[in-house]
Amino acid sequence: MRFVDLSAPIGQSPAETPEALRTDIEFSDHTEGALQIEAILGIPSRLLRDGEGWAVETFTRFGTHNSTHVDAPWHYNSRIQGERGQTIDELPLDWFFGPGVVLDMTARADGEAVDVDDLEAELRRIGHELAERDIVLVRTGRDASYGEPEYMGLGPGVTAAATRWLYERGVRVMGIDAWTWDAPLHLQAQAALERNEPGVFWAAHQCDLAYAQIERLVNLGELPPTGFQVACFPLRIEGAGAAPARVVAILPD
């Protein structure tokens, strides 16, 4: 088997990153670890290999959405189809391992809609009929800008109709290599204010469906359209609307 990592690395945010989007990590090295061991257990560094103790890292700020992550229905709305939205720890594990399908939408401009006819055309092109529990990954190519200030404002948007179309065919996990599944936030906001009506901003997120979406994927360009498995298990954070995930594609040799 061959493995392709579809998750972006998690690292210290640059100083200019806005607070709400920051990841901050404190690193404690082996020298500090030796001092901690002596302070806690009374063991001097001379009794440790090379005089070193443990290296430890501590997140001082790490939002559940600040990396490659999986969104749960609770993130979208408190109630989905009349029931309380499921949190990330309540979703079935079998959703997060299954056949992967990559749909190439790299030709779509930023803010342009990815609609039902686009999905149908791409599935015809790759010769695939969706099956229940396929994990559908939309490739936009915007991962080339991952980590850059402009990344948040890039990418097309999958429509609510397209999201529902996937759901009706048994897809419960769908992902994208852009910052968000819907169009960039500033473009959604502009359209919602101009139209002055609900259902425009965050339309696909709030389409009243119990599904999970993966955002901020990378390396989808290394995958074939089909013929691989995806493992995308989110961390089991109680009561959370999302969780970071190590998303990996598994391909046969």
Image: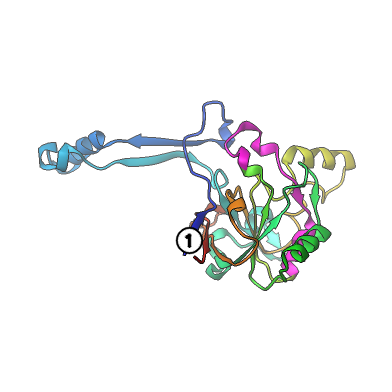
Determine whether, in the image, residue 74 is placed left or right of residue 5. right
Quarter of the rendering containing residue 185: top right
Asked whether 183 or 193 is in front, the reply is 183
Is residue 92 shown above or below 75? below
Query: Residue 215 in the image: x percent, y percent?
Result: 62, 50
In this view, which residue lies farthest toward the bottom? Answer: 132
Query: Residue 234 in the image: x percent, y percent?
Result: 52, 57
Asked whether 174 or 42 is in front, the reply is 174
Rendered residue at 15%/43% (across/down):
49
Rendered residue at 88%/38% (across/down):
194
In this view, which residue lies farthest toward the left? Answer: 46
Identify the main secondary structure in magenta.
helix
Rendered residue at 59%/57% (across/down):
223
Determine whether, in the image, residue 156 is placed left or right of residue 98. right
- Find disc 1 in the rendering and name its residue: 2
In this view, which residue lies farthest toward the right? Answer: 195
Is residue 173 shown above or below 64? below
Asked whether 192 or 119 is in front, the reply is 119
- For label 1, the SS is strand
Q: Is residue 152 magenta?
A: yes
Determine whether, in the image, residue 51 is placed left or right of residue 238. left
Mark 1 residue crowding within 10 angstroms, few (<14) / some (14–19) / many (20+): few
**Is residue 199 in view?**
yes
Query: Residue 143 in the image: x percent, y percent?
Result: 62, 43
Query: Residue 150 in the image: x percent, y percent?
Result: 66, 33
Is residue 123 shown above or below 32? below
For the rendered model, the colour scheme is: rainbow
Rendered residue at 53%/43% (across/down):
63
Q: Amino acid at mark 1?
A: Arg
Q: Is residue 15 magenta?
A: no
User: What residue span does the magenta drawing correspond to?
Assistant: 144-168
Asked whether 142 or 80 is in front, the reply is 142
